[in-house]
Image (cartoon, grey):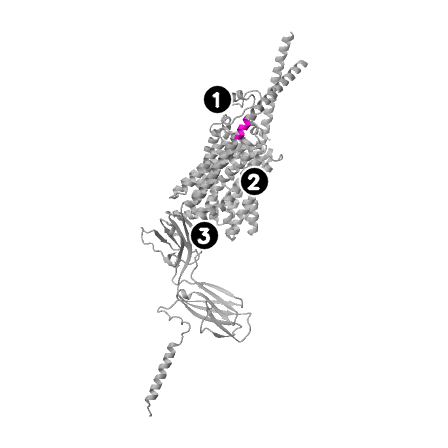
Amino acid sequence: MPFSWKHQFFHIFLLLVSCRHIKTKTPGPTPPPLAPISPLPTADRSVVFKGESHTEKLEVLNPVSLTLECVWAGNHPKLPNITGFWKKDGEAIENSHLTVQLENDQYLIKRVFNIVNEESLGSYSCIFGNEAKVDFLLAAPHIAEVRDKPIVSYVGDSVVIPCKMEEPKPKPNTWKWYKDNGTAKEQIFAAGKLDRFEIKNENGYTKLTVHNLTEADSGLYYCGAVYAIATTMSHVKLKVISIQEPLKPFIAIMVEVIILVTAILLYERSQSKKNSTAGNDVNTDQSHIQVQEENSLEENSSMRQRKI
Amino acid sequence: MPPAATTSLGYSPPDGGWGWAVVFGSFISIGFSYAFPKSLTIYFKEIQEYFSVSYSEIAWVSSVMLASMYAGGPVSSVLVNRYGSRPVVMVGGVMVGTAMLLASFGTSIMHLYLCVGLIGGFGLAFNLQPALTIIGTYFQVKRPLANGLAMTGSPVILSTLAPLNQFLFDSFGWRGSFLILGSICLNCCVAGSLMRPVTKVVPPKPGPGPPGCNGAAAEEDTRVQSENLQTEEAKSESKSQSCAERFIDFSLFKHRGFLIYLVGNVVLFFGFFAPVVFLAPYAKHQGIDEYSAALLLTIFALVDMFIRPVTGFLGNTKLVRPKIQYFFSFAVSYNGICHLLCPLLPGYAGLVGYAVILGLGFGMVSALLFEVLMDLVGAHRFSSAVGLVTIIECGPVLLGPPISGALVDAYGDYKYMYYACGVFMLAPGIFLFVMHYFNYKKLEEEQRQSVAVEMRTSEETVQLNMSQSDKSTNKAHG
């Protein structure tokens, strides 16, 4: 056996080079994380469609191993083969391209996704050929808007900001509150009774009470509904103003009332003065007429008597 | 024409001139009285959160306000009888303004009950009664029209206050809004300043003043007569009104027309407000979305707004005025029939149609409500009458919507509530119609009798004069 150290070194050299090559190769999209120690619950969703664009909304509360299936049954080119692939949030998922066979006049594509954290949520789409697709929107339950207009309160006063998860939707595990301090969301902790902030959590809703407001407390407040999979946020704007603000219109309207009342009463006084000066002449005229009438009446009656 | 009630004034009302300014003042006062409690509901949600109370506890604020407004009726009547309309309305305006001002600093729900509910309600009572009373003193011939116009204040002010309250709430929160509403309510004082006491021009006639005067009024008469020969100018209407009643005229309970009105009204108020209150929830129950349901209420308010002056005008026509009680009974019965038909109308189009005819009925009854009372008892006793009527109506007005609500909850369906309300309005309508038929007959009989008596007495006096003058001429000749 011709044993050559040169050959050996060459083999080792090749091995090392190829190993390094493998290490420095740019990795593709990170493969889905390895299955956690406890097995994920499974769920599946299947959509049968006829070529039109279809959107399916899915509410996810807990980590799940989700099987999504798209069935194109009808209105399709009757090709024996068609390419199908999956997209997440608009970007194609590597290794998801498949050749789909036409079976029972249907094209079927399915894939298992591990939905474990907030990044896993989003929009998943299955695409046949170039056009026909179904969108699956995965999200945690959405909180209905508390108020689209700001809540107004006053310096020194307290305010209660509520957040509620509507009845048919599943209740979150807990609630968290955040305040926007310009750059980031800062979580609010209601430490104890002495603290300015008070958080009261009940199953379907939460209330943040802020005592002793100052103008600095104005801004955006976020309430987060915490689910195992993610936290959904809803925001409310708080506006803290001083008591001077409503005082201005108050005083303005009061002044207007006083002016109108005085004007009306003065007008009445001037009218009555006019009437009393004119009235005396009218009175004397009237009394003259009345006296004449009475005289004529008496004359008539006496005339009657004389006639009789 | 129902005789005795209308000619007991003792002077001829202007029927115009400054009267129209008074109608405008009453428009504002009446509008605030009816619309203000209803418009406050916009703030309830936030106040409920702020004080951490249940919705029913906060809804009590509106109920207490309405109850005080009706219960304050007799107090208001007494004051109007004593001092006239103007001071009472101005005091009322100041009361409501102060109440809202105090409420804006409220620290507990009890504080709100007291300020907004009790004081505010009394202030509104001091606005409502005098505003109605003064129309009777200024108008006689055109009174139904004046009443119809004044009652239009309610839907107009409600339509103005609703979006205004929303705007105030978005800009200032509930505290600031209450503060500003306090100043807006002070405009009732402006309305009050317009309510100049009527100058009474009594047609000259030889003989004493109105009968049954007490000492003070008689002195006034003689003093005035010594100044101006034959014309009386009583500057303060209270002094001549106090001739008949210093406080409340309880003898009204013996007045046939008043009793008919009272019985009819107590029953009809059980079914009057509930259909309006439940219109939007009924629509939502049928699957209609919130905006379309709100549109129904707007349609109702618009129809209501236009029909009130029209009803007043119709009530003034020669055909209707003498038998205005029949017109009122017709309006009440029409309401009843509407409610009975409502459950049969299908879909959103049916509900829109129902909102229109409901607006017609509601407006007709509201416009005539106080006019027929004035027609029955006369402007002289109207003040006491309306005080007694409002405190007795307090019960059905407050109990009506909760009873209807209980009916809806019990059967899970709105139609039984509408049937019940229909019956509550149709029965009094027919009752009023029948009773007034008899009442008119009796009144005509009494009129004929009193005319016969007058003719006999005047004939006797003429004969007496003639015999006296015969004696004197005989003496002269002989």
- Chain where mark 1 sits: B
- Say which residue label 1 marks: B215
- Chain where mark 2 sits: B
Secondary structure of the magenta portion, mostly? helix
A58 or A254: nearer the viewer: A254
Specify whether residue B59 is in view. no
| Residue B27 numbered tag | none
Query: Which residue is at 38% across, 81% downward?
Result: A18
Circles 2, 3 touching at the beta carbon (< 8 Å): no
Sooner in the amino-acid sequence: mark 2 or mark 1: 1
Count of numbered marks? 3
The quadrant of the image that shows the N terminus of chain B is: top right
Q: At which x and y percent is residue B408? A: 48, 47
- Say which residue label 3 marks: A149
Q: At which x and y percent is residue A143? A: 43, 57
Specify whether residue A186 is in view. yes
From which residue to which does the magenta span run? Answer: A270-276
> What amino acid is found at the position of numbered circle 3 in the picture?
Lys
